[in-house]
């Protein structure tokens, strides 16, 4: 009994993953076909029977060819390195045709995300046999956090546009959407903090040499050691010690007060997170080391000049806590306090 239910459920799910609908032209064509069939039966005219057979053959041919187009095709996506709320990001889709001899024509691919509509789709006019075509579309994330790209919807109206056939292909991928960046002024740090610049054992931008290493994609051309590369017969680059400059801690209060409006506080909280992310990005660009401190923990410390991704990821996944949660840590001498009321004060 359970096996029968499981088999029925699987069959129903498989049926739901494929679909067909009439286009406007298809409805007109089918109604015309029915009219020609009624006329042929009533009059017995052989010419009408010939036309009816031709129209029915076109319907059958349309169904067979559209199925061939959607069979044995694969889709994969390439995600951007960064995605921000409210900013368009480019996602690439590659459609591969695994058929040995037959090409696929006129396929539209929709990359579906959970709880978020897809504004644009990718259209592939022709994908040859055992070939692959790449197209890209722009997606504008509406909220920070994890964006789940759950599946693809492949559809076609080939060859005559009478029907639209579609097929769903599961392909779950997660994209972390960073908070929106807003214009902010770089925080003014105490003079004593900037006097603490010193070499760090970590490799990175700096003035002190730290040795040589193999060249990697993305290294600057000016860092290549010409004489050593010529002697070894391969490219090597100079490594330098990263300078750890001023330390800035961004203190973000993520506790939800019990007396605030339920509708107003989430918007203020999102604005506060955007301000914290923007301050961190500006401070890192100015050479300061940055971390974020909240009631629920803290982000990794990013040294000055480094990529802000660890901090942006922490803020992207940060959620509110109860007002009676752990107390907010005491701000350091070089700190910036950010509250959901958008009160941003530099503590000197």
Image (spheres, helix red, strand yellow):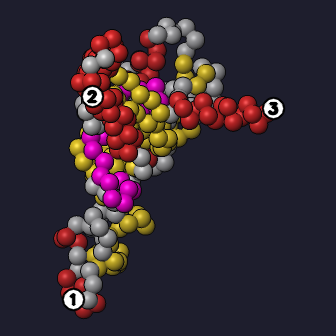
Residue 42, above or below 221: above
At x 41% / y 28%, what residue is drawn?
Answer: 20
Seen from the viewer's position, the closer of residues 49 and 159 is 49
Q: Which residues are magenta?
A: 97-122
Q: Is residue 169 visible?
A: yes
Q: CA distance from mark 2 to mark 3?
A: 50 Å
Q: Secondary structure at mark 3?
A: loop
Nearer the observer, disc 2 or disc 3?
A: 2
User: What residue sits right under mark 1 in the picture?
Assistant: 230
Classify residue 7 by image quadrant: top right
Residue that protrudes farthest toward the right in the picture:
1
User: What residue sits right under mark 2 in the picture?
Assistant: 50
Q: Position of residue 334 (x, y in %)?
A: 40, 40
Q: Secondary structure at mark 2?
A: helix
Residue 148, above or below 344: below
User: What residue sits right under mark 3 in the picture?
Assistant: 1
Seen from the viewer's position, the closer of residues 79 and 323 is 79
Q: Position of residue 175 (x, y in %)?
A: 43, 41
Q: Earlier in the sequence, mark 1 or mark 3?
A: 3
Left or right of 347, for residue 188? left
Seen from the viewer's position, the closer of residues 59 and 226 is 59
Within-10-Å neighbours for mark 3: few <14, some 14–19, many 20+: few
Q: CA distance from mark 1 to mark 3?
A: 75 Å
């Amino acid at each position: 009994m359970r096996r029968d239910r499981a088999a029925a459920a699987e069959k129903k799910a498989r049926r739901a993953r494929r679909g067909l609908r009439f286009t406007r032209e298809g409805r007109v064509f089918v109604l015309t076909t029915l009219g020609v069939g009624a006329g042929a039966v009533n009059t017995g005219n052989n010419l009408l029977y010939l036309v009816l057979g031709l129209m029915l053959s076109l319907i059958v041919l349309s169904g067979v060819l559209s199925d061939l187009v959607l069979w044995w095709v694969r889709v994969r996506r390439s995600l951007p390195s960064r995605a921000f709320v409210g900013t368009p990001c480019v996602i690439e889709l590659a459609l591969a045709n695994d058929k040995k001899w037959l090409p696929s024509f006129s396929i539209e691919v929709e990359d579906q995300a959970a709880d978020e509509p897809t504004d644009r789709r990718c259209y592939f006019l022709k994908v040859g046999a055992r070939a692959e075509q790449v197209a890209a579309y722009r997606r504008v994330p509406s909220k920070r956090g994890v964006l789940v790209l759950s599946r693809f919807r492949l559809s076609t109206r080939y060859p005559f546009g009478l029907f639209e056939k579609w097929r769903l292909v599961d392909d779950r991928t997660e994209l972390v959407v960073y908070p929106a960046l807003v214009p902010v002024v770089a925080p003014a740090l105490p003079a004593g903090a900037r006097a603490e610049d010193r070499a760090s054992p970590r490799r990175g931008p700096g003035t002190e040499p730290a040795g040589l290493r193999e060249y990697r994609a993305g290294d600057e051309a000016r860092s290549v050691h010409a004489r050593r590369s010529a002697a070894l017969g391969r490219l090597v680059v100079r490594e330098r010690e990263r300078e750890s400059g001023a330390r800035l801690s961004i203190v973000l209060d993520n506790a939800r007060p019990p007396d605030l409006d339920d509708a107003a506080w989430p918007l203020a909280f999102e604005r506060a997170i955007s301000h914290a992310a923007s301050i961190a990005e500006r401070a890192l660009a100015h050479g300061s080391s940055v971390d974020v401190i909240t009631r629920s923990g803290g982000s990794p410390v990013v040294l000055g000049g480094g990529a802000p991704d660890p901090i942006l990821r922490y803020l992207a996944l940060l959620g509110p806590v109860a007002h009676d949660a752990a107390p907010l840590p005491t701000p350091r001498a070089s700190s910036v306090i950010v509250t959901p009321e958008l009160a941003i004060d530099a503590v000197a």
